[in-house]
Amino acid sequence: MMQEDWKTLLQGNALAGPSELRVPRAQAIADAIFDHPDYTLVRCSRFEKLGILEVLVVDVECNAVPPKNPIGIEFRERLALMVPDKPEELVEVLALRESFPRLMHQNARSPAYPPSLCLYFEPTRSVTRTWTAQSFLQRIQVWLEKSSRGELHPADQPVEQMFFAAQHELILPWNLDALLLQIPVPVFAIIAGPERGEGAQSYFLAQRPPGRNDSSPSLSLVQLTLPPVVHGRLEADPPTLGELTDMLETRGVNLLQALKDAIHDRVDASGVPVGQDAKGTIVLLHMPITRAEGQPAEKIARRGYLVAHGALRLGELTGTLFQLDGKFFREPTAEFLAHGEQLAWRGSEITPIEAIRNLDRKSARFQSGLVEEGPTGTVVGAGALGATLLDLWGRSGWGQWTVIDKDHIKPHNLIRHPADQRHLGLSKDKVAVERYSAVMNGAGSITSVHADACDFVDDKPLPCIQTAELVVDVSTTLDYPRLMSTRNDVGRHVSAFLTPKANASVILMEDAGRLYRARTLEAQYYRAVMEQPWGTDHLAGNHGTFWSGAGCRDISVVMSYSAVLAHGSLLAEQIRTLSGASDAAIRVWARDAQSGAITAYAVPIHEERVIDLENMDLCIDAGVVEKMQSLRKLNFPNETGGILLGYHDLNVNAIVVVDALAAPPDSRSSPASFERGVLGVADAAKEAHRRTAGIVGYIGEWHSHPPGHSAEPSRDDFYQLVYLALGMSHDGLAAVSLIVGASGELQVLKCTVR
C-alpha cells in the first residue's frame, strides 16, 4: 500500500461503528476487543481497492511494559489493525504513534510507512491453523511487552544482518574468507545459474583460473569491504543505488567513495576499451556486523546488488572515469564533471541478491550435530526423505512417479539431500527428475510438478493427486494430510516422517478404500504416543538448530544424513510392502543409534465417526467411544466422566478427539450426578501436550448417564457447557461436552463464547 493510501484509509471511509464491518475476521476482532479489558476501539474504516481492507484503530494498554523503558514503548499505544478480506493473508498491525521506535522485529516498510509489527515467528499457514481474534490480541500485547524489555529475540540468536531475504541469490565459495586474505587477492568471475521461475535466479562466485581473462564478461564484479556496522532491525532493500548509499550513510558507511575507489583501480594510464566493459555489475558488499559500538565483529554479512551497467560505465556515471576515443580513462576533467553526469548514478536501479556461502566440512559437521572430524572413508551416496525414497524406488524400478515440490536447493540442503553442487539453484522436483534420468538413462522417467500440493485449481486438487493409486506424503507438515482427509476425489494416501531426534520413523497408511483416512490415523497415533512406553520421548526436542539465512525464521534442524538414509531405507521397504495390502496401518520403528537395534510397533486402528456440529466437524474414533463406554459400565450404577484431549484445526474446521481420560480419584459421583475432581488432571494434560510435541491438549469434558437414561443433555449439562466455554473463551476456541448413554448412544455439545 502506498503512503497516501494508508493515510486515506486511516482518515477517511469511516464507518459508523463495528456493526458496519463486513469482513468476518474484522467482526470477530471487534467482538474480542469489546470483551477485552485492555483494548478500546477508537474507530473503524473501510478501504476498497483490489479487494476489501477494513481497519480497526485501537488503544491497547500493557501493564507489563516497564515505565520509561529504553526501547521507547509506552504503557498505552494506538494501533491500526489492517484486516484484509482474504483469509489466507494475515492481519497487519501498524503503530500509529509518530515516535514509535523502529525495532528489529518489524516488517519491511518504507520509512514513511508506520512501523509494522512482525507478530509471528511461524509461516502464515501454520498461524491460520489456530488463529483466533482473542489469541491475536494477546499476541500483540506479548509483542509490546517483550519488545519493551528487549526479550523478543532468543538469547542465542545471531546478530541480525541488515536486509531481508532476497529473491535472487549469489552462492559464494566456502573458503571465501581465506581467499580474500591472500596476496594478491584471486580474480573472481560471476557465473549465471538457471532461473527458478517467477524471475528468480542464482549466481555463482567462482575463482577465475590463472591466465584466463575474458575480454567481455557478461557480468563484472565489484567487491567492497565496508567499516563495521552495529546490528539493528532488518531493512527493506532500496530500489536505487542512490537510496542504498543514503541508507548506509545513516550507519556510518560511505558507499559511494568505496565504489569509486574500487572502479578507479581497474583502469591504468593507457585506458580500457569500451567493448571490454560488461553488460552488468554485481556489487558485493562485505559488512562486518557488531552487537554494539566498539565491539568486535561477530559475523561478516554479505549482500549483492545487480546494476544494469558494467563496472566501467558505472565509474563514468559516478564521475570516476570518462570516455574518449572509444576508451575509458580515469581522472575526468573539471569540464566533464561540470556537466553533472556524475550524479546520474543515483537513479541506477539495483536488484538485491542474497549472498550465501557454500558449505565447508566444519559447518557440515555442525549442521549434522557432530563434533569429531571422523575417519577418512568413502561415502557412496529430493526434502531429504522424499528424495531418498525416490532414489531408492527409482534404482529398484518400483513405481512410476510424479513428484511435487516448490522449493529449490540451497547449500545447506546438501548435508541431508542426495543432490549435489550441480543442482544448486534448481527446484527440487527438477533435481529428482535429473537424478532419476542420470541413473536410469531413459529406461524410465519421473514427472515433476513445480507447485504447492495444498494449492487447489477450481477447488480441485492437482490432477496427479486425483488419479494416483498411492500418494506418499513426506511434506513434514500437518496441512496436507489433514486437508486431503476431507477429500473424496484423491487416491490412497500414506504419510511417512522422521521424529525430531531421528530416533524413530512412522508410517500412517490409509486403507485401499479410504475408510480410515490420514486424519483419524494421526489422532490414533497420538493416542498411542500418549499411552505407550515407547511414546515417552518419541517426539521430544531435536539435536539442535542452526541459523541458515538472514532472518529469524531461517531455522533448520540438526540431523545427520546417515539417520535419513537409515530410516529412509526402512520406510522405502515398508511403504512398498504395506501398499501391497488393502488394510490401513500405523507403524512405528524406534532405532537405537548406538547399537543399531530397531524395534517395530503396530498400533491398532478404529473406525472414525464424524459428527456435524453446524460449521465444524467433530471427529472421534471408535476406540475413544469404547473406552468411555467401558468406564461407564465399570462405574455402574454411578455416573462417571473426565476430560477430553484433542486439538482444533481451524484450517479444515475440525475438532479432533484423541483420548478421553478416566475420572480423577477426587471426583464425586452418584446415580444421579457427577462432579469431576482435579487431582492429576493438569499433569495428565501437560504430559499429553509434551509427548505430542504441543499438538494435543484439553478440548472439553465427557460424562456418562446411568442405566435407563439416554444421552440427552440435562439442564445441568447445559450449565456445565457454558462454564466450559467461558473457560476457553480466552483462546477463542469452542468447548466440547460429550455425553455417553446406553447402547453406545453419544451426544455432543459445542459452545463458543464470543
Image (tube, rainbow, N blue to C red):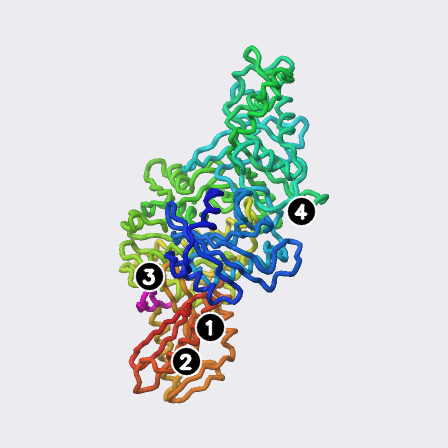
Query: Is residue 604 highlighted in magenta?
Result: yes
- Amino acid found under the numbered disc labelled 3: Arg
Q: Tell us which disc is closer to us: 2 or 1.
A: 1
Residue ID for mark 2: 641
Given the current orientation, which residue lies at the most extreme top position?
325
Which label belongs to residue 291?
4
Q: Tell us which disc is closer to us: 3 or 1.
A: 1
**Label 1 or label 4, whichever comes before in sequence order:** 4
Is 330 placed above or below 262 here?
above
- Amino acid found under the numbered disc labelled 2: Gly
Mark 2 burial class by Cα count in 10 Å: few <14, some 14-19, many 20+: many
**Label 3 or label 2, whichever comes before in sequence order:** 3
Q: Position of residue 262 (x, y in %)?
A: 63, 26
**Gap in Å between the C-alphas at discs 1 and 4?**
44 Å
Q: Position of residue 748 (x, y in %)?
A: 34, 74
Residue at 41 percent of width and 74 percent of height: 660
Taking the image as shown, residue 207 lies to the left or right of residue 617, namely right
